[in-house]
Amino acid sequence: MIHVSKITKIYKIGEVETVALDNVSFAIKKGEFVAIMGPSGSGKSTLMHILGALDTPTSGSYTLDGEEVAKLTDDQLADIRNRKIGFIFQAYNLLPRTSALKNVMLPMRYAGIPLGQRQTRAKKYLDMVGLGERLDHTSSQLSGGQQQRVAIARGLAMNPSILLADEPTGNIASAQAEEVMAIFQEANKNNHTIIMITHEPDIAAHAKRIITIRDGKIISDEANKKQKLAKLINK
């Protein structure tokens, strides 16, 4: 589904060049749950922006579902972001004085989905994340963990094949983080490909595969041993 080949990203401010990504290559198959892990400044968020077609590499190639992303028009990129990729951000990015239901309906409105279908689908996903009783609550009336669950429901609303999550548990308590990870694992069981950016080892441990990045380079890429062991035990 995703193939990244020799991606380099250089930011230039005046005469100063900063290498955010340095010759990064990997592939992600449909249905994988991958954590991209690294400390602050490692390049993981830059990588997520490239994977989400929000930024372009300085060199190298990124192929999504067989299409070279660099060759797509702005309209084609917007269509991919709307149809194929669901975004979940650390800051939630919800409209503060808008209900949970309407926040989840928003991307479907941009896609031209009829109102009745938008409402039905939004209710379905809010119920899935445990907020079926909070449909009319505005973002400001919800806790941080509840806001993150609204953001997850919104990310799933277009039934994207890929879910990109940038530090999805960074602003919530550990108990709420476990709830969020349970939702991700359920979505993964439903065949959503999940790519999660995190700097927290205990959060990365929920993924089936962990790619570790440091100073813009991949230093390890391996199956999560705990997940692998659990799978063997449950056979």
Image (spheres, rainbow, N blue to C red):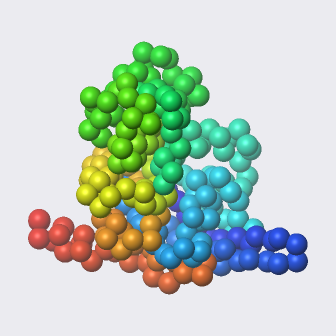
Report how many numbered discs are placed on residues in the image.
0
- Of 179 and 3, which appears nearest the observer? 179
Q: Which of 21 and 137 lies nearest the eye of the viewer?
A: 137
Give coordinates of residue 20: x percent, y percent: 66, 74
Residue that lies at the very extreme toward the bottom in this rendered image: 219
Q: Residue at x 49, y 75 (%)?
A: 38
Nearer-the-camera pick, 132 or 210: 132
* Image quarter hosting the C terminus: bottom left
Q: Residue at x 24, y 74 (%)?
A: 226
Determine whether 98 is above or below 144 in the image.
Answer: above
Indicate left or right for 72 with 208 as reference. Answer: right
Which of 165/163 is in front? 165
In the image: residue 40, left or right of residue 180: right
Q: Is residue 173 above or below residue 73?
A: below
Q: Position of residue 169 (x, y in %)?
A: 39, 58
Q: Horizontal and vertical percent for residue 47?
A: 59, 65
The reply, left or right, for residue 235 in relation to residue 9 is left
Farthest residue to the front: give it.
Answer: 141
Instruction: Name, please, the residue furthest toward the right.
Output: 15
Quarter occupied by residue 5: bottom right
Q: Quadrant of residue 233?
A: bottom left
Q: Residue at x 17, y 69 (%)?
A: 230
Give the residue at x 71% y 48%. Answer: 72
Q: Is residue 110 left or right of residue 76?
A: left
Q: Can you see residue 116?
A: yes
The reply to whether residue 24 is in sight is: no
As drawn, 138 above or below 186: above
